[in-house]
Amino acid sequence: MGLCLALVAAALLLWMAALVPELPPPAADAAKIAGKDQRALPKQFADGRDKRCCGYPLSEDQGFALRFYWLAEQWRFADAWDEPQQDVYTAEGFYLGTFAESYVRALRMEGSGLLEDGRVVNFAGRCGYGTGTCFEQVDPATHPYGRGAGRRPLVPFRSVAIDPRVIDIGEPLYIPEFDGLRLPDGSLHDGCVRADDTGGAIKHRKMDFFVMSFDNFRFLLDKLWGVTWITPHVETPRCDYLRDR
């Protein structure tokens, strides 16, 4: 009899439990996947981003136009002796030299140049002397390849010129299209560059890669044949060694 009563009581408890509605999860747990978090979580894993590796892309795949720039070297214009000659001055009115018209155009385009006597000069903006475009002489001990934004030294194969409204000056960037690129000295690029420079023609999604010389440009043009668009990444731990300390 006692066994029968126990079985009946157990069956009654199971029947009553089935009648109790299932409670919703606690509000705190539901909040973890609500709103923006709920939308961001699948997006984060869907595009394969891994902050420990490569940071976050600034655009869709290959969304930035790639261009190159280098030091305008005076010796390359030795055959321009029969061209019109132009006087070049500093913004303070000091005479820097007289150069072939085509070389002055190259100085304006590249922004920095190496003169035959070893002086390094940099674009200094509009002025009221000579051609109306002035330059400054920089110290080759601190700026051997010219000066970028905010007096930053240009570094071959590391410095890029950007639009500061899009990328902060000094920001390290990872360029997957550069990773493994063979450089003129035989070494391989690790894909890391830094926003060291700006330019009047560099607007929005455009990036200029500083390669030091025209010969280096020709070398890389062969290695990067067909690569005219790149995918810059920011917040890349692998490139933090380029960050200003």
Image (tube, grey):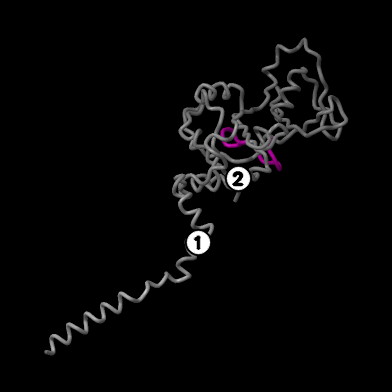
- Numbered disc total: 2
Against 137, residue 216 (above or below) is above
Secondary element type, mark 1: loop
- Picture coordinates of residue 15, whole percent (x, y): 27, 77
Q: Residue 42 magenta-drawn?
A: no
Q: Which mark is residue 171?
A: 2
Residue found at x 53% / y 41%: 174
Q: Is residue 1 above or below residue 201?
A: below
177 or 104: which is nearer to us? Answer: 177
Mark 1 / mark 2, whichever is N-terminal: 1
- The three-letter amino acid code for the residue at tag 2 is Glu
Which amino acid does the dot numbered 1 rest on? Answer: Ala
Q: Nearer the viewer, mark 1 or mark 2?
A: 1
Residue 26: horizontal and vertical position, in percent?
Answer: 44, 71
- Who is closer to the viewer here, 139 or 159? 159
| The residue positioned farthest toward the right in the image shown | 128
Measured in 3D between alpha carbons, the distance from the residue under mark 1 to the one under mark 2, in whole angstroms, is 33 Å
The image quarter in which residue 4 lies: bottom left
Q: Residue at image x 17%, y 87%? A: 5
Region rendered in magenta: 147-160
Quarter residue 99 falls in: top right
| Residue count near mark 1 (Cα–Cα under 10 Å), binned few <14, some 14–19, many ≥20 | few
Figure check: 71 above or below 242: above
Q: Dot 2 surroundings within 10 Å: few (below 14), some, or many (20 or more)?
A: some
Q: Position of residue 101 (x, y in %)?
A: 78, 18
Label drawn at residue 148: none
Q: Main secondary structure of the magenta part?
A: loop
Query: In which quadrant will I find the N terminus?
Result: bottom left
* Left or right, residue 146 beside residue 157: right
Residue 172: x and y in percent read: 57, 44
According to the picture, the residue beneath numbered tag 1 turns out to be 34
